[in-house]
Image (cartoon, rainbow, N blue to C red):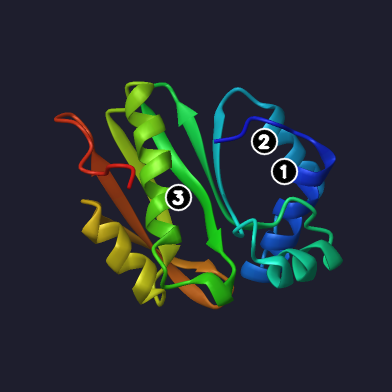
Amino acid sequence: MEPSASGPTISAIAMLEKRCFSDPWSENVIASALGSGNYIFSYIYAAEDDLETREMLRAEGNVPGMIGYACGLISLDQCEVQRICVLKEFRKRGFGERLMNELLTAFNAVGASSVFLEVRAGNVPARMLYEKLGFREIGTRKAYYADDDAAVYELETGNGLRATIN
């Protein structure tokens, strides 16, 4: 976890947003969330010795070498996963699960009784991850995205979270 709202962090998140989402957050939205005490962020970086990846990311404005991030919102005793992304070339390596585990651990630390998230109905790999972590589907938001419905998930944390940091 990194609380910094530095320029390089904002630029790196903005680059990830543009590469991973059809509706990316603007740098202003990112800076606002980073500056708010209601959001939790978690990051994954390219290995220090992976110079090729770090140089490619730096060329795109991602100076810190961030390859993924997650963001969650705390609202009293309920929390919501707002964003989670890992660059395509780094997927299927456990980074998404690690980011989710870090967020869920932080949510547990603030006493969350439940965690919610929305995911594209067609995003099967993400849905499988959420279900593996104990989330259950509780509904659908029709046409939530321009090209897909959203599946709504909840994780009740009354007995503690099942997630652990690897």
> Label 2 near label 1: C-beta < 8 Å?
yes
Q: Residue at x 18, y 29 (%)?
A: 158
Residue on which disc 3 sits: 99
Instruction: Using the rendered image of the protein, determine whether residue 21 is visible from the camera's viewpoint.
Output: no
Q: Eyeballing the image, is 72 above or below 152?
A: above
Residue 136 occupies which quadrant of the picture? bottom left
Question: Regarding mark 3 in the picture, which secondary structure is present there?
Answer: helix
Give 144 or 40, whichever is nearer the viewer. Answer: 40
Q: Residue furthest front?
A: 49
Going by the numbered disc 2, the residue's amino acid type is: Ala
Residue 151 in the image, given as x and y percentages of width and height:
36, 63
**How far is the residue under mark 1 from the one under mark 2?**
5 Å
The residue pinned by badge 1 equals: 30
Indicate left or right for 59 with 13 as reference. right
Location of residue 84 in the rendering, given as x and y in whole percent from the top left corner: 51, 55
Residue 53 lies, in percent from the top left, at 69, 70
Any part of residue 57 in sight: yes
Residue identified by numbered label 2: 33
What residue is at 25 percent from the left and 53 percent from the top? 133
Task: State which quarter of the image contains the N terminus.
Answer: top right
Which residue is depicted at the point 21% across and 51% down? 134
Mark 2: which secondary structure? helix
| Amino acid type, mark 3 | Leu
Asked whether 68 or 115 is in front, the reply is 68
Specify which label sits upstream in the sequence, 1 or 3.
1
Q: Amino acid at mark 1?
A: Ile
Q: Is residue 102 above or below residue 92?
A: above
Estimate how packed mark 2 is, as few (under 14), some (14 to 19) or many (20 or more) residues with alpha carbons within 10 Å. Answer: some
Report, in whole angstroms, how far the alpha carbon at label 3 lies from the one at label 2: 17 Å
- Which circle's residue, 3 or 2, is located before the other in the chain? 2
